[in-house]
Image (cartoon, grey):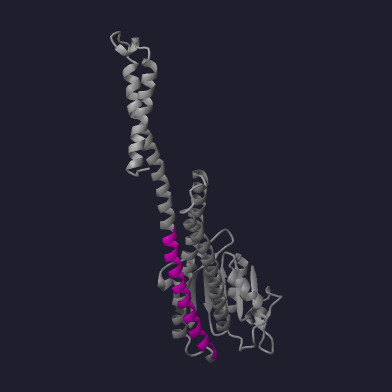
Amino acid sequence: MLTAFSCDPGHRPIRLTDVGDTASLHKAVWIELLDPTADEERLVQEATGQAVPSRDEISEIENSSRLNIRDDVLYLSMPMVSMADGPRAASVGFVLSRERLITVRFAAITAFNNFTARLTKEPPHNGSGAHALLGILEALVDRQADVLEGAQVDLDDISHRVFALGGVHNTGRKIEDQMLRATLAQLGRIGDLVTHIRETQLGAARLLPFIEANTTEWLPAELKPRFAALARDIESVNDFDRTLFDKLQFLLDATLGFINMAQNDVMKVMTIASVAGIPPVLVAGIYGMNFKNIPEYDWVYGYPYVWAMIVLTTLIPIALFWWRKWI
């Protein structure tokens, strides 16, 4: 899908309706390509004279591939988070020149939708692609900060649920197992999301100094304070992300600890049952032998005597475990 924005005579961003015309695209300050077709890529190249990076090119992980400059045009890429099918990494490419910005992506990303929705409400500016790129990055940081705040609320709920379980003894083992399994799955999803956000923030942090260092001749002066403010926001989000990841790891260890405790309780019950069951089985085995010279066979009270021995040899180990506070 091909979308383009230009500026009206009052320098206010407007969305272009005729994106099939190279003359209109040539006037655009921001051209967005979402999962583009070969025809759309060719049209943009003809209108701008700039190469459109492919999916493989923007997915490269080397720093030299993510940040490079050719003929005074910056070719940038960074990972972002797509929530279309759950949190997953989606690389985005940026082609920044004096006249315009071209973005290439192959997945739906909420930050782009948020920026597009508020673009027409932006104050007038000189219509450069740098304004669009900075606005996208600001929308990205705002969006991911909101997502991390939501993850913090989820982790607080998990913390309350997990540690409240430690003082409850009548919930039932089956209910506890189901709750702990669900908690592990939820922690895994949050951990996946937090990791992707950290990768995105690191990518954005690398972009800013590279852009500033290579656009000193034509970067609008009014954007420099916004670049500095964005760098500070990224650093604060990174700090919050690290704190959140530490809490996530702590809750994961706590959940696994409760699972181990539950398994130990099961093993303890099985051990006590096996130890307490050995003496009565021995008594029953002795008096179950078919020898004629066993004197208790002719005794009137032989049968209740054996039962008393079985019950007594069962209760003695249990009483011993209770006395030693093993149960």
Q: Residue furthest front?
A: 300
Q: Quadrant of residue 209?
A: bottom left
- Residue drawn where x is 48% and y is 83% of the image: 72
Indicate whether residue 15 is drawn in magenta.
no
- Residue drawn where x is 51% and y is 45% of the image: 172
Residues 174 and 183: in front is 174
Q: Residue furthest top?
A: 292
Q: Looking at the figure, which quarter contains the C terminus?
A: top left
- Residue drawn where x is 52% and y is 52% of the image: 182
Q: Is residue 277 left or right of residue 40?
A: left
Q: Is residue 263 visible?
A: yes
Residue 316: percent from the left, percent from the top? 34, 33
Residues 13 and 58: in front is 13
Q: Is residue 52 visible?
A: no
Residue 48: percent from the left, percent from the top? 58, 78
Residue 315: percent from the left, percent from the top? 37, 32
Residues 308 and 119: in front is 308
Region rendered in magenta = 222-251
Q: Is residue 157 left or right of residue 297?
A: right
**Chief secondary structure of the magenta span?**
helix
Q: Quadrant of residue 265?
A: top left
- Residue drawn where x is 55% and y is 83% of the image: 130
The mark tally for this picture is 0
Residue 23: percent from the left, percent from the top? 66, 80
Residues 187 and 131: in front is 187
Indicate whether residue 237 is drawn in magenta.
yes
Query: Image height check: is 192 above or below 101?
Result: above
Query: Image height check: is 95 above or below 167?
Result: below
Q: Is residue 307 left or right of residue 167?
A: left
Query: Image height check: is 49 above or below 306?
Result: below
Q: Residue furthest right?
A: 17
Q: Quadrant of residue 284?
A: top left
